[in-house]
Amino acid sequence: MSEDTPVSVTMEKDGDVAVIIVNNPPVNALSWHVRQGLEDNFAAALGDDSVKAIVLRCAGATFIAGADISEFGKPPRGPDFNAVLNSIEAASKPVIAAIHGTALGGGLETALVCHYRIAVPSAKLGVPEVKLGLLPGAGGTQRLPRVVGVEAAATMTSTGDPLPAAKAKELGLVDELAGEESLAADAIAFARAKIADGPRPTRERRVFGDVAVIEQLKTANAKRWRGFEAPYANLACVEAATRLPFDEGLAFEREQFMKLMFGSQSAAQRHIFFAERQAAKIDGLPKDTQLRDVKKVGVIGAGTMGGGISMNFLQKGIPVTIVEMQQDALDRGVGVIRKNYDASAAKGRFKPEQVDQMMGILTPTLSLDDLADCDLIIEAVYENMDVKKDIFGKLDKIAKPGAILASNTSYLDIDEIATATSRPGDVLGMHFFSPANVMKLLEVVRGEKTAPDALATAMAIGKKIGKVAVVAGVCDGFIGNRMLKPRQIEAMNLLMEGATPAQVDKVHVEFGMPMGPFQMSDLAGVDIGWHRDPNRIESIRDALCAEGRWGQKKQAGFSDYDHKRQPSESARVAELIEEYRTKAGTQKREISDQEIIERTLYPMVNEGALILAEGKAQRASDIDVVWIYGYGWPVYRGGPMFWAGLEGTDKIVAALEKHGFEIAPLLKEKADAKSGF
């Protein structure tokens, strides 16, 4: 080992048992120097005749949590991981993995080459690589079926969900459970007891279980895995373990791993993994910014949004005071919250007593004055500037000093709302997405005068309630809805020129979106924002609304819907489009699927470039996070700005110019350099 190699692995002896300890904070990732340390210390333990058994354990909060993904794509350094694992598995003395915290990915693969495994009850074991568009590339897909059987191995690798230690013991993945506080001593005792049994190489065990379960998993997850490559590659590797000798199975796994590793889907999923963590960082914020204490939250509005927002806080044990103007609206809103919680309890997500506890910290009221003791007040009323300013003017007099005043607006100017108060530093946007108790995205809108500690607190509280929070600047629609606007405009233009709603939607669904622009409009309500005058028809949308085609709620929108809300193409909509097209003097023509991509998705990238240049998003990856978590952009495409790099910014600019768009200077700059964002 060279002098500049960090000492991340050490060895101690307890009589005839060698204990090899990994210490690579914070999560004992398998960095190159850890692999080097494992190779050196195992060689030393195996070369010492006084050592009869070896325990591998970790310092700190966890066992080896997985590979060091910061090394992905970089030139290899240190010993090859597979070679290190093969040498541990081939050890002539019994090797015991002592597991606490998490043994994930490469961590579990390390435990699998050990001959026995002991774990504390709180430990979790799994192979989450599929969530990064990968598969366990160091024998995990070949060793797991030999230890837990085909069904468990196929399920673990294709879903990436970890197992608690007790379940792992039931499956044979863990041989013994240790005491939470006595893992080190219990592992040594267990190792000593296994000296007589000797090594038990995993590769020599037989695969067991019914391979038919693999097809069953594909069928059961067809919708969830639509468009993804990694789940199927994982299953192909587990299936290979059932029919190939071990070394041939390893070679097949390696081939599949490399295909995924250098493919666009894994690059996109790894990008989002890092982007989500990066989004939590606030540019220009002093490092010593102290967070404000949020012990009680007020929510104004008990409708769909207000109720959903309240649930986020109640679930974390944070008391909520919810305000409505009318008693029947208040009762209805509280009733919906209770109904939602009861439905979750029926599915086993909550115990009935937990539901009672959450409802017990909800205070319904008709008076804004009851918000006087709240630390954070979120307004979630009708999207109207005058209404919002009126509420914030009242809050200015009611709220205690230091309370954060937030608006759940999706479009409106936070700076203008703040002018209704004498404390603009306390005002910001907290834009939740519907349904607010389910959707993970939270756009935190930084006003011109928003205080740094108010912003930092809103971001932190977002994380606390399980949201992925992203900072946005003040502009029409912030990040997500601003980029949605050009897509919707072009989708409507395409109808005028000859596309059908079904064709436009199909292109978006095939791209990987959960639904297309017109399906989304029908779901949300075609009449949202409509002027309500049936005689004033200035667009196809006006024509639909005038006939009461308001979307799924009326079983008629851009599509017709049956009682199960299943869509079908509408002859009446085709007539209305043709009537409006004739009236406008537009010639109908064939529209290709590629043109739909170029005119609905490429303009979003263009708008994203403007948002970045204006500083309304901190970084391109934040835009990607917004679209992944707020709008269902397929994670395997990495968000619109990452996808622009895959698609080619030069190709995007050429197509936008062909269709007559004005090109954002930043996008043009990227295209000229043939680079992504």
Image (cartoon, helix red, strand yellow):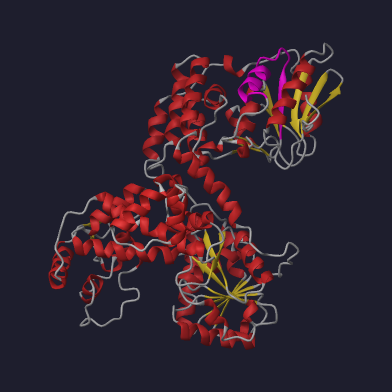
Q: Quadrant of residue 502?
A: bottom left
Q: Is residue 612 left or right of residue 450?
A: left
From what the image shows, is residue 283 above or below residue 171?
below
Q: Quadrant of residue 214?
A: top left
Q: Residue at x 21, y 78 (%)?
A: 537
Q: Which residues are magenta?
A: 79-99
From what the image shows, is residue 418 above or below residue 350?
below
From what the image shows, is residue 577 above or below residue 331?
above
Q: Residue at x 57, y 56 (%)?
A: 351
- Between residues 290 and 307, which one lies in front from this camera angle? 290
Residue 186: x %, y % from top left: 78, 29
Quarter of the image that includes the N terminus: top right
How many marks on residues?
Answer: 0
- Could you tell me if residue 295 is visible in this image? no
Q: Is residue 82 magenta?
A: yes
Q: Quadrant of residue 201?
A: top right
Residue 469: x %, y % from top left: 57, 60
- Between residues 3 and 370, which one lies in front from this camera angle? 3
Q: Is residue 599 left or right of residue 164?
A: left
Residue 664: x %, y % from top left: 42, 62
Furthest-right residue in this view:
15
Q: Residue at x 53, y 38 (%)?
A: 160
Q: Is residue 376 left or right of residue 336?
A: right
Q: Is residue 28 magenta?
A: no
Residue 66: x %, y % from top left: 63, 35
From what the image shows, is residue 138 above or below residue 449?
above
